[in-house]
Every structure is written in C-alpha cells, then in structure tokens.
Amino acid sequence: MRLQPYTFKVKYKPGPQNAADCLSRLSQVRDETTGRNIAEEYAYFVAKNAVPNAMTFKMIKDSAHLDKDIKQILNGKISKSNNLFRFREELSVIDGVLLKGSRIVIPDKLRKQTLQLAHEGHQGIVKTKLRLREKVWWPGIDQDAENLVKSCRACQVVGPVPKQEPIKRTQLPDGPWQDLCADLMGPFPTGEYVFVVLDYYSRWQEVAILKSVTTDKIIRSLDMMFSHHGIPISLKTDNGPQFTSKEFYNYLSENGVKHNRSTPYWPQANGEVERQNRTLLKAFRTANAENRDWRKEIPKFLLAYRSTPHSTTGKSPAELLFNRKIRTKLPEINAENEKDDADTRRKDFEMKEKGKIYADQKKKNARIRH
C-alpha cells in the first residue's frame, strides 16, 4: 500500500551478489513477556500502545498510586463511594496500569496533560473526543474534552462562526402606534438623510428628510409625527450617537416613552425597520434610474405602500392605523370596513411562523454545507 504512489521496477539479483548484513542473521531475542497467556499478551499490547505521545507508560504507573480511586482498585479493594465503582465489571489491571476494556484509565494528575495532547492539532470537539476514546478513559472524559476545546483561545480566534440562535419574532402589540422602531438611512449623494419610523402593529411608515442627523433634528421630526398619531409607549433604535445622547434620553423620558436599543453591530435585532429600508432604497434607485427627483417620489411611494395590504397582516397599514381605507387614484366603491383584530393576529402569527421555519432551516442547511 505504501509503494502505490511510486513507479518502480523489480530486478532479480542472485544471492552471491546480494550479501546480507549480519544483523539480519541474528536469532530473535527472547521477548520479555514470555510466560504470559494469549489474553494477557493482547491486553499488555493494547495497554502499551494506547499510551499518548509524550506520556510514558512509567508516568501512568507512577501517577496511578497518587489517584485515590485507582489506588484503591490496584490494592484489590473498591468501595461504593469510589467513582469507578459502577464500571468495576469492565476494569482490569495489567502491569500496574488500570484498563477499562482496552483503554487506559488515566490518573487524575495526568488528565489535563492528556487532554492537551489530544487537542494538540486543534481539532474540533468531535475529533478530540474520538481521539481520546480510542486510547484512554476516565469518568467525565467527554465533558472535559468539550470544555477544553471551548476554552481554547486559538480555536476561538480561527474557528467557525458560532451557529445562530433560532429567530425570535417580535410579538404583535396590543394596538396601533404603541410600539415603534426607528432608523436612519444615508447620507445620499445629495448629502441628505432619511429618518424612518415604523409602527410594529400596522406597519405604517413615517419618513422625514434631514440635512443633518443631530439629536435636535431627530427630536423635531418625532414631535411632528407624534402630533399626527399621538405619543407611543416605546421606541426602538440602534446605538447611534443621536439616540444615545442625554438630550434624546430626556426627551423620551419627558414624554413617557420607553427607549429600547438594539444589540450593537447586529442589525437583525431591529429587523422590521431594516426590511422596510430595503423597500425604500428600491424606490430611491428606481427614481434615480428614471431621472426623477427622489424627494418628490417619496410621497407617491408612501401613498402606495400605506394603501396596499401587507403580506404579513393581510390588511393595509392605513386600515390598521385609522380603521379605514384611504382613497387613492384607483377607482373603488366606498364601503364600511370593520377591523377584525382576531383575524389580523391570526394572519400575523401564521406568516411569522412560516418565516421563522424558513429562516431557521436555511441557517441549518448553511451549517451542514460548511
């Protein structure tokens, strides 16, 4: 098998021309294990070859007498308080070394060194466990191996990104304009920014165009929005300086608004408004592609968005916020529309569950591919 990678030729050489060295003619030295039966020979072979690299057989024998559990067994006694008591039927002693089956029971003093030897190549948890299970054993070896790999700094630096937690969907608020989320977009090529506020319940969107994004400008925009729809219960933002300033904190406190901040560098934590931002960006790019002023296109986009049934709730943002449909350029028959809160919640729950299942499965498949 070892010669398969090579291309070679076999040539016959007569014996007189092939002088053998003297060492090959010496008789075989008597083996030190002569006198043992076949079973003992096998056990001795397994024990001796199971010793990890850089750890001698003598080290294990010497350390065994310092381990109270192993020492008790070597002395021919084992109590029920012994950690190895429940494995007693699988234990055997060969040349002063305790075995469990064909694996060496490592004394407590050498377990840390054994773990480090097994993890020398910085393999993962599974591979490290497999390497250990092949040769050595002690109670709790799997957990010890797992703890070692998880605490290995080198593995943490170069290892794969930890698997993501399953998606936790935001619970639908009790009513419209109670829980809001906000975000900033920009700067755009014109040097302006867009301040977006979204209602979690109705998905109603408010947009303000700003030339600067100071806390004062943000507060003025919120004042105008609150004057139209009222003061909400909570507002969720990222950790931008505009939203973490003392001035912004005082403003929300004076209005009795609870400020929720998303996890730093984790836009998914404020995913609802981030998703709406992508829709807005598409409208801006469309206006730019058609050589239109995007500022003038925003009202058209908002009218269309607010009057269109949302894919999650099944109703338009205007219906859920105002309990009525708003008039658009499309012809329609005016009819009284009753708000069906139970149906809205059912539809919202079903769509979110479908989205959660899809997203979690996608992450699972991505982990399998890697």
Image (cartoon, rainbow, N blue to C red):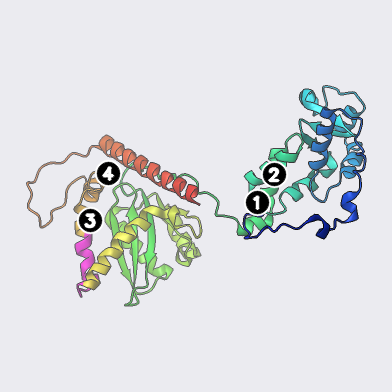
**Dominant SS type (magenta):** helix
Q: Which amino acid is tagged 4?
A: Thr
**Closest to the observer: 39 or 295?**
39
Among numbered discs 2 and 4, the one appearing first in the sequence? 2
Q: Where is residue 275 in the image (x, y as percent from the top left)?
A: 35, 56
**Closest to the observer: 15 or 36?**
15
Tell me, yes or no, whether the highlighted magenta stretch contains residue 299: yes
Residue at mark 3 to residue at mark 4: CA–CA distance: 14 Å
Disc 3 secondary structure class: helix
Residue shown at the point (34%, 58%) measured from the top left: 197
Which mark identifies residue 305? 3
Which mark identifies residue 123? 1
Q: Residues within 10 Å of mark 2 (few under 14, many from 20)?
A: some
Among numbered discs 3 and 4, the one appearing first in the sequence? 3
Residue 190 position (above or below residue 150): below
Q: Which amino acid is tagged 2?
A: Arg
Q: Where is residue 54 in the image (x, y as percent from the top left)?
A: 82, 51
Q: Which amino acid is tagged 3?
A: Tyr
